[in-house]
Amino acid sequence: MMGSRRGFRERRRRKKASRAKLATKTEAVRAEAHRAAAGRSTERRKARLARHRAQLGELWTWTKGVGLELRSRARLGARSLRNRAAPVA
């Protein structure tokens, strides 16, 4: 009777070891996939931030141009008002 119990324990130990090995392999595959996905998401994030930086640069350039345009128009408007208000000599 004792021998059969020992055989049972040995078979159970092997079965558990086999499952553990399989779980380790599965986990390794899953971890690799997770690392790859994380790398892709980092690349997407970097690309998105680069796009945002480019858009902000473009917006800043446009805003500067509009500001300069408004200032020059304001100068012209002030000049024409001065000319209109100047007494005729």
Image: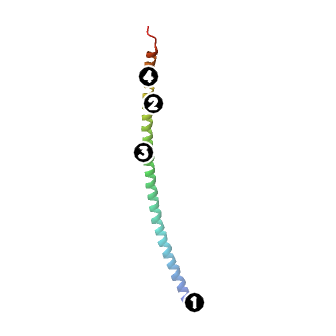
Where is residue 48 shown, x and y percent of the image? 44, 48
Q: Give the mark, 1 or 2, whose residue is nearer the N terminus.
A: 1
Q: Nearer the viewer, mark 4 or mark 3?
A: 4
Residue position for label 4:
77
Residue drawn where x is 45% and y is 42% of the image? 53
- Specify whether 44 is left or right of 5: left
Where is residue 56 shown, x and y percent of the image? 45, 40
- Mark 4: give few (<14), some (14-19) or many (20+) Cα within 10 Å: few
The extreme top residue here reads: 89
| Count of marks placed on residues | 4
Considering the image in quadrants, where does the C terminus appear? Answer: top left
> What amino acid type is highlighted by mark number 1?
Met
Residue drawn where x is 51% and y is 82% of the image? 11
Residue position for label 2:
67
Where is residue 12 shown, x and y percent of the image? 52, 81
> What amino acid type is highlighted by mark number 2?
Gly
Residue position for label 1:
2
